[in-house]
Image: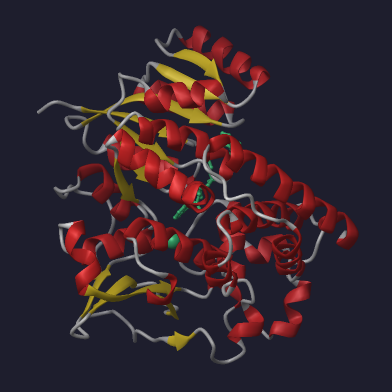
């Protein structure tokens, strides 16, 4: 069997590490050609020692220089390069078959587009790239002949619950139901959310993840981004997208068909499952995850998103439908605002409940420009960030 040659963008992160864990279980199937990271030199060095990639990319010149020096000392074969150009280069390289997009935020958009245009098998964890890129992203996938496979656990579950032929989806699907755990504050009084600290917001009950997505899970902006992601991945309308709170995270999402049948995917909360599925699709390989034990499985419970104070607790969720129905580019504005707001909350500049205030104000202020390509998207992203930052400064404690 010819080995799948892999580039892992964001290899030192939570998804990146889980990807390499799955890859290391199958040395006969995968070859790691390129790894990329922002600033974590020592974590990258350890990965280079284990996987001996041809290229390692760091986000800045000083980090690249530090890594190059350490790689030289160890006598490793890896060449060190520097982002941002190098990210697009490895994502579209002729030496790469599969790109794992696991950078966090809109910073991953350009390499995703490059991989899509180059016709790669594109494993998408970086949901923000699709939320920002929208139709532009899908056009790049179509024109490049790329295979876009979801890594987000909900979207992997939906993909696994759909028929093989996407041409049949439209006539068969009634709706897609995304499950949400509700995060760490599901039972907390909404009025007390102004007191929440970054440490509390990052302590997710079911999943261990990067800090940005952990805060998004606590506000449910993560689910808002996932609703937008599902709209683009599966071609359904915003009315066909539903969210239900399911605190145990056993059902990872569901598809309801025209005849009311519901098909779901279940499993333990371990990202190696959707990662292994993306890597091996349409086959299945061992992922390293533990199986569900139905003898010990507690009750599976569900809560409507408009019940029990949830509208006040998660005001950002509704912004998904609002921006999907709004002008083209609205989702990019929402994403940029949220990235700025989450960073400001993590730096203790604004309160947890003010994340929504920043998102709301930015959506109201910034006029989207119906972006038709990468440049227009980056321009809109920059304008929305500037507006969001201005609101952060007004609110800053
Ligand atoms: P993380 O913060 O743990 O890792 C992010 C990675 O991207 C790191 O390697 C970091 O060095 C790199 N990076 C960050 N900013 C960068 C920049 N500006 N330029 C280049 N590289 C940069 O994040 P994560 O939790 O692994 O999440 C990655 C993506 O996957 C996010 O979009 C997230 O929403 C999505 N996702 C994560 C999980 C999860 O379980 N962690 C689940 C579903 C989806
Ligand atoms: Mg998810």
Q: Residue 173 location in percent, x, y? A: 25, 73
For the C terminus, which image quadrant? bottom right
Q: Residue 142 location in percent, x, y? A: 31, 42
Q: Residue 227 location in percent, x, y? A: 46, 66
Q: How is the image coloured?
A: secondary structure
215 in relation to 62, above or below = below
Q: Which of the two residues, 278 or 272, is positioned nearer the viewer here?
A: 278
Q: Look at 47% across and 62% down and name the residue there.
A: 228
136 in relation to 352, above or below = above
Specify whether 135 is left or right of 261. right
Q: Look at 39% across and 62% down and name the residue there.
A: 230
The answer to whether residue 349 shows anywhere in this view is no
Q: Look at 19% across and 59% down and name the residue there.
A: 167
Q: Which of the two residues, 43 or 261, is positioned nearer the viewer here?
A: 261
Q: Residue 324 location in percent, x, y? A: 52, 65
69 in relation to 21, above or below = above
Specify whether 322 is left or right of 140. right
For the N terminus, which image quadrant? top left
Specify whether 271 is left or right of 185. left
The picture quadrant where one finds residue 323 is bottom right
377 in relation to 3, above or below = below
The picture quadrant where one finds residue 341 is bottom right
The answer to whether residue 53 shows anywhere in this view is yes
Q: Which of the two residues, 124 or 53, is positioned nearer the viewer here?
A: 124
**Furthest residue to the bottom?**
308
Q: Look at 74% across and 71% down and name the residue there.
A: 353
Specify whether 126 is left or right of 219. left
**Furthest residue to the left?**
1
Q: Count how many numbered circles sit on residues in the image.
A: 0
């Amino acid at each position: 069997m010819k080995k799948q040659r892999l580039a892992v963008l964001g290899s030192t992160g939570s998804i990146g590490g889980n990807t390499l864990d799955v890859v290391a279980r199958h040395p006969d199937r995968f070859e790691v050609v390129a790894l990329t990271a922002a600033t974590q030199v020592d974590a990258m060095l350890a990965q280079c020692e284990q996987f001996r990639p041809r290229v390692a990319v760091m986000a800045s010149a000083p980090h690249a220089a530090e890594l190059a020096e350490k790689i030289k000392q160890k006598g490793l074969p890896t060449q060190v390069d520097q982002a941002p150009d190098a990210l697009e280069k490895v994502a579209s390289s002729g030496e790469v078959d599969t790109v794992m997009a696991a950078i966090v935020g809109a910073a991953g958009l350009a390499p995703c587009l490059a991989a899509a245009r180059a016709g790669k098998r594109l494993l998408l964890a970086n949901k923000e790239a699709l939320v920002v890129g929208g139709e532009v992203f899908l056009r790049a996938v179509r024109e490049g002949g790329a295979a876009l496979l979801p890594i987000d656990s909900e979207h992997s579950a939906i993909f696994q619950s759909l028929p093989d032929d996407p041409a049949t989806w439209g006539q068969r699907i009634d709706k897609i139901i995304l499950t949400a755990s509700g995060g760490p504050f599901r039972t907390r009084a909404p009025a007390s959310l102004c007191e929440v600290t970054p440490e509390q917001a990052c302590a997710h009950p079911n999943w261990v993840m990067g800090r940005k997505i952990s805060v998004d899970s606590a506000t449910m902006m993560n689910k808002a981004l996932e609703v937008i992601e599902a709209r683009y991945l599966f071609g359904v309308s915003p009315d066909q997208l539903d969210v239900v709170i399911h605190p145990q995270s056993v059902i990872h999402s569901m598809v309801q068909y025209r005849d009311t049948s519901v098909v779901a995917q279940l499993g333990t909360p371990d990202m190696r499952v959707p990662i292994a599925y993306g890597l091996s699709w349409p086959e299945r390989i061992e992922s390293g995850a533990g199986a569900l034990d139905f003898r010990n499985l507690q009750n599976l419970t569900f809560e409507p998103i408009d019940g029990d104070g949830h509208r006040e607790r998660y005001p950002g969720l509704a912004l998904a439908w609002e921006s999907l129905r709004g002008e083209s580019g609205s989702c990019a504005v929402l994403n940029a605002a949220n990235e700025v707001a989450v960073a400001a909350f993590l730096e203790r500049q604004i309160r947890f409940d003010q994340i929504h205030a920043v998102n709301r104000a930015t959506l109201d202020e910034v006029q989207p420009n119906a972006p038709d390509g990468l440049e227009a998207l980056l321009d809109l992203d920059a304008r929305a960030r500037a507006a969001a930052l201005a609101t952060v400064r007004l609110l800053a404690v």
